[in-house]
């Protein structure tokens, strides 16, 4: 062994503490309008129907950076979603959730105070877990497509107990 | 000469572990950029093993690897001299 590395795919941010912050006032108003509109259209949640006063909105940073993989993850979870301007709106665990990309390129999950922080964290963890599985599958497919032309010959492939995929390549002509 | 291999572990949490085996000296460092490009990823941690500090000795005429000698980096030598 000469060098061992840990790499982070471009579609994923480094793991860290999930910070919670208040959504800016202008965005709060925008989200309120959206919520009111949605309530009129498809109000299904009896509690949300009853709430007419403006809600408080908060955001939670996620590790997700890629829109198409977020879409695939929500599809895999059997979760309907729609894009509204720069927001992805979806409903999970009977709660309304929104995702929006911040300036750093990370998607933030946005909830109102009808969703407790504990439930919000659970929702983010579940969506993110599916996202990393989608990412793992995508990296695997791309790697196998490119390896041979880069002089790597696949010698073995193994699925480990924790669902890691171990690929061993021999190196040719470098 | 050791067989040159690369082991890549795709973890379900999205992170990737890679191990470059059978190379000596700076050659294995070249593989960091190669793997980053291949995997569309960036390195967040790296560990060098004993073989990194060995150098291949080439015979100019035949361009063949004759033997490996251990080259200890100056920084490590200085640190051990201080002790």
Image (cartoon, grey):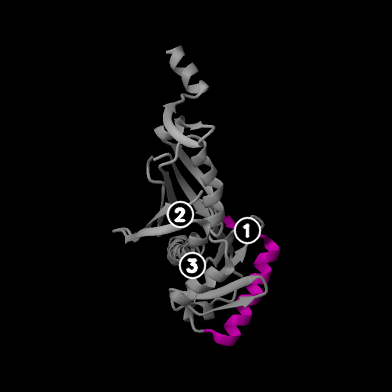
Q: Looking at the picture, do discs 3 and 1 lie on one chain?
A: yes
- Report which residue position mark 1 lands on: A105
Query: Real-space Cα distance between discs 3 and 1?
Result: 25 Å
- Report which residue position mark 3 lands on: A115
Q: Residue at x 68, y 71 (%)?
A: A30
Q: Looking at the picture, do discs 2 and 1 lie on one chain?
A: no
Structural crowding at the residue carrying mark 1, measured as other residues with C-alpha within 10 Å and reported as few (<14), some (14–19) or many (≥20): some
Q: Does residue A94 appear in this view?
A: no
- In the rendered structure, the answer to whether residue A156 lies left or right of residue A112 reads left
Query: Real-space Cα distance between discs 2 and 1?
Result: 18 Å
Which chain contains the residue that carries disc 1? A
Q: Is residue A87 above or below residue A162?
A: below
Is mark 2 in CB contact (under 8 Å) with mark 1? no
Residue A130 included in the magenta stretch of the image: no
Question: Residue placed farthest to the left in the image?
Answer: A161
Structural crowding at the residue carrying mark 2, measured as other residues with C-alpha within 10 Å and reported as few (<14), some (14–19) or many (≥20): many
- Report which residue position mark 2 lands on: B15
The front one of B15 and A128 is B15
Which chain contains the residue that carries disc 3? A
Which circle, 2 or 1, is nearer the viewer? Answer: 2
Residue A39 included in the magenta stretch of the image: yes
Provide the residue span drawn in magenta.
Answer: A21-43
Figure quadrant of residue B12: bottom left
Q: Does residue A87 appear in this view?
A: yes
- In the rendered structure, the answer to whether residue B22 lies left or right of residue A82 reads left
Quadrant, the N terminus of chain A? top left
Q: Is residue A47 above or below residue A133?
A: below
Q: Residue at x 44, y 79 (%)?
A: A78
Is mark 3 in CB contact (under 8 Å) with mark 2? no
Q: Residue at x 54, y 50 (%)?
A: B34
Figure quadrant of residue B54: top left
């Amino acid at each position: 062994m000469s060098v061992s590395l840990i790499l982070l795919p471009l579609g994923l941010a480094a793991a860290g503490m999930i910070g919670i912050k208040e959504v800016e006032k202008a965005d709060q108003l925008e989200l309120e309008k959206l919520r009111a509109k949605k309530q009129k259209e498809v109000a299904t949640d009896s509690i949300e129907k009853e709430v007419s006063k403006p809600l408080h909105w908060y955001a939670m940073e996620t590790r997700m950076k890629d829109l198409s993989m977020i879409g695939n993850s929500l599809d895999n979870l059997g979760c309907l979603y729609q894009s509204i301007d720069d927001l992805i709106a979806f409903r999970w665990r009977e709660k309304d959730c929104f995702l929006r990309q911040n300036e750093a390129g990370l998607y933030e999950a946005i909830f109102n105070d009808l969703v407790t922080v504990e439930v919000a964290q659970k929702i983010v963890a579940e969506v993110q877990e599916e996202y990393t599985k989608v990412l793992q599958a995508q990296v695997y497919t791309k790697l196998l497509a490119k390896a041979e032309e880069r002089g790597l010959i696949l010698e073995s492939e193994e699925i480990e107990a924790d669902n890691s995929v171990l690929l061993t390549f021999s190196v040719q002509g470098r | 000469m050791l067989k040159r291999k690369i082991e890549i572990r795709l973890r379900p949490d999205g992170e990737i572990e890679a191990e470059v085996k059978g190379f000596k000296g700076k050659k294995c460092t070249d593989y960091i950029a190669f793997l980053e490009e291949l995997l569309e990823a960036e390195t967040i941690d790296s560990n060098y093993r004993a073989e990194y500090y060995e150098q291949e000795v080439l015979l100019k005429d035949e361009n063949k690897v004759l033997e490996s000698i251990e080259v200890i980096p100056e920084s490590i030598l200085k640190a051990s001299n201080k002790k």
